[in-house]
Image: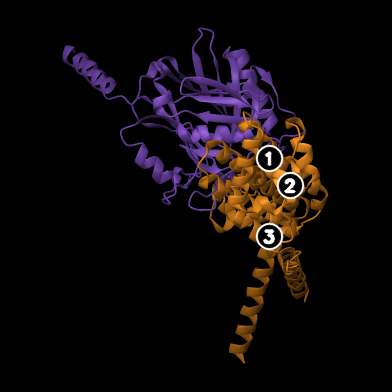
Chain colours: A purple, B orange
Amino acid sequence: MRKSIFLVCLINCVLNVFAQYDGSYVSVSSLSYNNEKISYVAMARGGNRVKAKYFASRDFNGSTVYQRFLEWSKNKKLIAISSGTYMWPSCNGSDPQTIPVGLCVDNGIPVNKNLILNGLDGLAVVYPAGGGGGIAVTNLKEGNLKISDGGTSTTLNVRNSWDLQKFITWSQGNSATVFQSHLFVYKNNFLLDPSKASGKPAPRRVLAVGTATDGQVVHYIIDLPGQNNTIYDAAFKAYNFLTKRAQVNITFMINLDTGCQNVFQVYRSDGSIDSQFKGDTPIYNAANLLVYYFE
Amino acid sequence: MKRTYIFYLSFFINVLFLGILLYYFLGADNKTTTEPVDLDFHEAKNVDLISVLKSVPYESISKKLAVNDYHHASNIHDFKTIENDLKTLDSLYPNHKFDLRVIIGSLLTDTLHNRIRNNFSSFNFKELFRLQNLLIRYSYYSQCSYTEENNLMFSVIANYWGSFIALKLSELSKQKNGVKFDFGYRYLESRSNQYRYFVNTKVSSLEKFIYNLLTSNWGHLINATWAQTSILQKFIFILLSLITLLSYFLLFNELKRKIYRYNKN
């Protein structure tokens, strides 16, 4: 009996040593909320151990997003992977013409310089691992994007051509990754106008960042796998869930496209894939990927 | 006899359905832009900045240049000339280096845009082509200049027109589905994409459906089709499937009967 207990403890210790990530930073759940299945991954950013990485499109060598991800993810402790922003004209990762909609810079390289001013109000900046690996989102309508260049902090209104150019130059110089998406919630205010959002029912997913009751910054990926949610329904349900149940003060909430590029994978702390989180599209067809990992 | 009628009727419905599909694609507006276009603003005149701005106060530069159509002048289509113009402005109005570039930049973006705003109510290949040449020219200028301020100004102008053309083309494709089949449109679209200002050309639901069918994106196809179609559409789909099955069943039966008779005789 003693030997068995010792063996179990030993296995547990070995598993913890070789675990993919520290489970205390990540909380994963799939539950029923207001008669709706909601799955979420909550990642605490305390100490900047949980980081984000975004693969916007193929690189200039022709490597697909999946190939880039495979190369990059060697020895990385993965937490969650999801498709990111909208793609055009298709969602097929092997199609070289597939490009993110709106302004997009991938690791300092401009992919799409076409800033969309109507509709996609969320401009997300994913900082490189050396810069904290966090995600910041600005509301384009407010025009107060704060960047820090060489210790000098500047506020830019990227709707203005000169500030937009400065921002693109800054993101190139700082190897930042930038993409645009629908902004649902900003500074705890629900912004989505139901008349302007897509009324098509589909599975939906959102990315939200906020502050928990203990003051910690938490990143949430909330998945609504049901087939009957319009963008508005999903955003509102996620907003209610976060503010009422999770008691989070939301900094921003943006859309993660599911449509024809619904990639979603969540890893347990031991590195195995959690099968309760699943997208329709296999990861090798990914057209763009938002990855959370532990360092 | 009745079976033959049903066979012909179901076959006719199938042919009709395929005909509608074919008409949708082949009957689309395939007009092409064939008229020759000017390669550039060859007819533009040169503006001599020194004589135009003689004794003009700093506050009135923008107005004076706009009155003299500087944004249409040949000066802006030659790298050396515009660089020299900027040097001239720097010498005429010292200590305003950045602001002078903002003035020239705004002349070549907002002022020029206001002057030509009414030319884009429909697909105007010639005007868009000219603007695209301006974008390409300035994106190269932005890599050639030695001064950071000039680089920034050239990039701003290129970026302004790059975004404008991409958004205009997207807007036009939303207004009129057939415009995307125009070769002029396709040419502008591909050049815009080449310079990383991607055009979101409208893709209809049917085109998306066919694309997903061809690329075997079954998961999305089944989910989207089931979730996004109305009960009537589902009913029509099931009805058409049944009619197709029935017509094939009757066709094979008919063939079987004929082969049997032929063998018997």
Q: Dot 2: within a 10 Å radius of its alpha carbon, few (fewer than 14), some, or many (20 or more) residues?
A: many
Asked whether residue B238 is in view, the answer is no
Secondary structure under tag 3 reads loop
Q: Whole-Å distance between the Cαs marked 2 and 3?
A: 16 Å
Using the image as rendered, state which of residue B14 and residue B39 is in the foreground. Answer: B39
Q: Are marks 1 and 2 on the same chain?
A: yes
Q: Which residue is mark 1?
A: B104
Kind of residue sitting beneath label 3:
Asp
Identify which residue, B251 or A33, lies in the foreground.
A33
Mark 2: amino acid: Tyr
Residue B17 on image: x %, y %: 74, 65
In the displayed structure image, the side of residue B254 where residue A50 appears, left or right: left
> Which residue carries the number 3 mark?
B40
Label 1 marks a residue whose chain is B
Q: Nearer the viewer, residue B118 or A93?
A: B118
Chain of the residue under label 2: B
